[in-house]
Amino acid sequence: MTQPKILLPPGQSETKKFPLVGEKTPPPQALDPANWRLLVGGLVRRPLSLTLDEVMARPSRQRQVDIHCVTGWSQLAMTFSGFPLSELLQEAGAEPQARFVRFVAYSPRHHDTSLPLPLALEDTWLVHGFDGAPLTPEHGFPLRTLTPSRYFFKSLKWLHRIELVAEDALGYWERESSYHNVGDPWPGDQRFTSGSLRPEKVEKLVQAESLNAFRGAKKILIGLDLRHWSPKDRDLRQLHLKQCDLRHADLSAVDLRHANLSLCDLRFADLSHADLRQADIEGADLSGADLRHADLRQALLSATRFFTGDLAAPRDPAKIDHLRFEEASGILEDQERFLLGG
């Protein structure tokens, strides 16, 4: 008997939306067509500097691909317009010692990422359109990269520079959020690099009277076993607990504003009366959690799950009485219907 084709990588949820992830607003120079340039340099024989008109005048084709975001959402059969990176690099002429390609964005935080050159030549396109229309600014207008065989953070918005290099270097999300430098979604374990604390450090976190030593964007805690945790310090603002096991944790009435709980297992956790405003909860599992009177306004909720199974017969639904989630972004369709009462 023929086995059905598996369309989604491990841990992904399908959506028909195009969720907004990462940096949301480009700097003015990214949207200035008169001064915009695409620069191709590094280990190339013929450096290029292209205007937007020159890029847009190139023959454009459509490419239908499946996109998988590291936060846990996937959209199948998305249609982009553009052209292969290989065509541009053929014009520039790679030097023999070039082994990697680095992409740099017009962005407030100078986002960048890299790929092995053979992979980029095979799979990366430069795209300017989606579903028959130009990309919107929040999705990378006027030009972005597209590498569908890797998690979507490897596809860079607001492309400015392409550099061929001999040695690899970690990109923005790989440096700042410990995202895996390979980022292949199909193994299911290439979302993050290992960042777990040693057991004695985990115990120090669990017993801490104050969490200030663990707070801040540079202090990313990944894959910790925090089941049944009841923090003594109820101020969890700006903690970065990614892909952690927080099942049955007592987080009632905690302050989690601006915290990062992406891809955490929060099943059956008590988050009643918790303040999660502007928290990043993308890809987290909140099935069975107590969210009564919790505040998720302006939270990031791409691929966040509030129940298990099908909406018609949900298992382990979260308790959501008096839950607030105005202006929360990225909620997938079935989860949003659940939060709105079916």
Image (cartoon, rainbow, N blue to C red):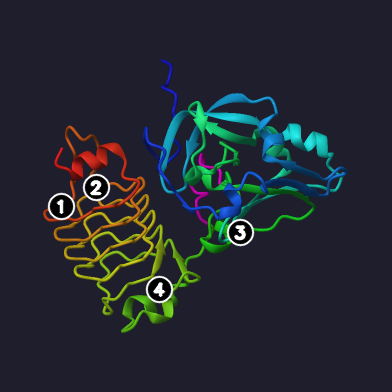
Query: Residue at image x 66%, y 32%?
Result: 56
Q: Residue furthest bottom?
A: 209
Q: Are marks 3 and 1 in contact (CB under 8 Å)?
A: no
> Which disc number belongs to residue 110?
3
Query: Which residues are drawn in magenta?
Result: 183-192
Q: Check disc 4 and give the amino acid type.
A: Val
Q: Nearer the viewer, mark 2 or mark 3?
A: 3
Q: Is residue 10 magenta?
A: no
Tell whether 173 sits left or right of 76.
right
Percent coordinates x, y for residue 180 in the rendering? 56, 53
The numbered mark, 2 or 1, whose residue comes first in the sequence reads: 2
Quadrant where the N terminus lies?
A: top left
Quadrant where the C terminus lies?
A: top left
**Residue 131 vs residue 291, the one in the foreground:** 131
* Element assignment for label 4: helix
Residue pointed to by mark 1: 320
Q: Nearer the viewer, mark 3 or mark 4?
A: 3
Q: Are marks 2 and 1 in contact (CB under 8 Å)?
A: yes
**Residue 101 vs residue 285, the one in the foreground:** 101
Numbered label tally: 4
Q: Check disc 2 and give the amino acid type.
A: Phe
Quarter of the rendering containing residue 52: top right
Judge the density around disc 4: few (<14), some (14-19), many (≥20) Cα neighbours within 10 Å.
some
Work out how far the residue at label 2 is from the one at label 1, CA to CA, in angstroms: 9 Å
Residue pointed to by mark 4: 202
Judge the density around disc 3: few (<14), some (14-19), many (≥20) Cα neighbours within 10 Å.
few
Q: Check disc 3 and give the amino acid type.
A: His
Residue pointed to by mark 2: 306
Work out how far the residue at label 2 is from the one at label 4, CA to CA, in angstroms: 27 Å
Q: Are marks 2 and 3 in contact (CB under 8 Å)?
A: no
